[in-house]
Amino acid sequence: MTQLDDRTPAAAIPTETELLGRARDLGPMLKKNAAQTETDRRVAEESIQAITDAGLFRIAVPKRYGGYEVPIRTFVQISSELGRACGSTAWATTLINVCAWLTGLYPQQAQDEVFVGDPDARVAGVLAPTATSQKADGGQVVTGRWGFASGSLHASWVIVGIPVVDETGETIDQGLALIPRAEISIDDTWYVAGMRGTGSNTIVADQVFVPDHRILSVPPAVGGAYPTEHKDERLYHSAFVPVLALVLNGTMVGLAHGALDLVTEMLAKGRGIAYTFYDNASLAPTVQLQVAEAAQLADTARLHLLRAADDIDRCAQTDTYMDFLTRARVRADVGTIARRSREAVDLLLNVHGAGSFAEANPLQRIWRDLEVCTRHAVVNAEISKELYGRALLGVPEQITALI
């Protein structure tokens, strides 16, 4: 195991191409386990172990602990490759990885507690401050419930939103509390139509003490001020809200391309169109047009994803915090990616026909997964367009602080 402050030798760090290849190579196994993942309402343990063995839970962990610190572009591409095979697995992995990135923003003392001796440590989180707090000597005592904690069934730590209060009980800050899994419980509440395997249950804390060094202040973080002492680690200069929002899109783009894979494979077998004279659907102009349009929509989503990731990475590498207008545009990109991915799959369902909805057909699971994950509150296309429009027009009042 890597010890504190021992830099992992460069030869031991896989290249970004190697990591993407590992994610791609996991595809057949993740597809095989997708139905079990959905039935069990948690990612299959074989899949979790394979992702761990491939190093894909280390992509956002600091190199100081044996992690890889990959750029956000590589992060979202890995999520996309996993999503091409299994939406639930990709989503849970993505949320665990972005919480590892969040952990890298905390003071080193907190990071040490999570990653020393365990660069594969998994952190899950919910950022909404659905809790109460009491001031205590050296920290806060926290009680609350946090829903939709994707990946929490596989995590050893959690990050949860809390109000930070003073001695009188008045809220003086909004924070993110980093808590060991052993100090919280999880209520089994995730019964849904799609993304069933993400295990997005409810975290419960009852009078849990959280020391100050494990509470990250949100308002300064939104503006790019992070307490980590390691200012040379460029990944942890990335813009706060753009990262947290954009990483969700990797799975969506993967699901859209996974649906395209399934339908083109089906068409390659020479299937006809019922109640027509077409013995080979591939020869029908209506099919050709819809498949081409679906491919263009999926590619449009991917291009928006990579542009936004490149913008985040470029600013982080030059130690320039992303300007407000670009951050607003990334929020708009997030909504656009979700919508284009969903539109692509809608067209592919038309091509595949009623058979798409057979329980044995993976296409219906992709459809349900995409319908659910693209409704995440941070992804809301209408809200994101409104805030971007306000930014473009110089309207001073915004509709959210999360930009």
Image (cartoon, grey):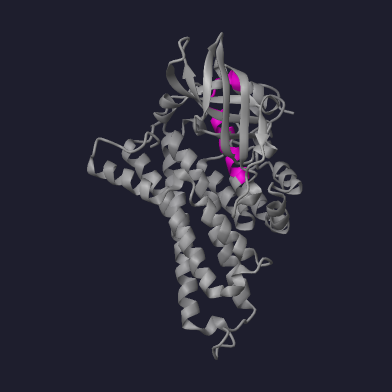
Is residue 95 in the magenta section?
yes
Q: Position of residue 67 (x, y in %)?
A: 64, 33
Left or right: where 348 falls relative to 155: left
On the rendered image, what quadrant is the N terminus found in? Answer: top right
**Residue positioned 58% across, 70% down in the render:** 263
Q: Is residue 259 above or below residue 104?
A: below
Q: Nearer the viewer, residue 358 or 352?
A: 358
Q: Position of residue 337 (x, y in %)?
A: 45, 54
Q: Position of residue 305 (x, y in %)?
A: 46, 50
Q: Quadrant of residue 388?
A: top left
On the rendered image, what quadrant is the C terminus found in? Answer: top left
Q: Quadrant of residue 208?
A: top right
Left or right: where 14 falls relative to 311: right
**Residue extending furthest toward the bottom:** 277
Q: Position of residue 308 (x, y in %)?
A: 43, 46
Q: Nearer the viewer, residue 61 or 125?
A: 125
Magenta stretch prevailing secondary structure: helix
Task: Give, as a single range, the part of the protein colored magenta.
Answer: 92-110
Q: Is residue 368 visible?
A: yes
Q: Is residue 89 visible?
A: no
**Residue positioned 55% across, 14% down in the render:** 139
Is residue 46 in the magenta section?
no
How many labels were placed on the picture? 0
Left or right: where 271 falls relative to 401: right
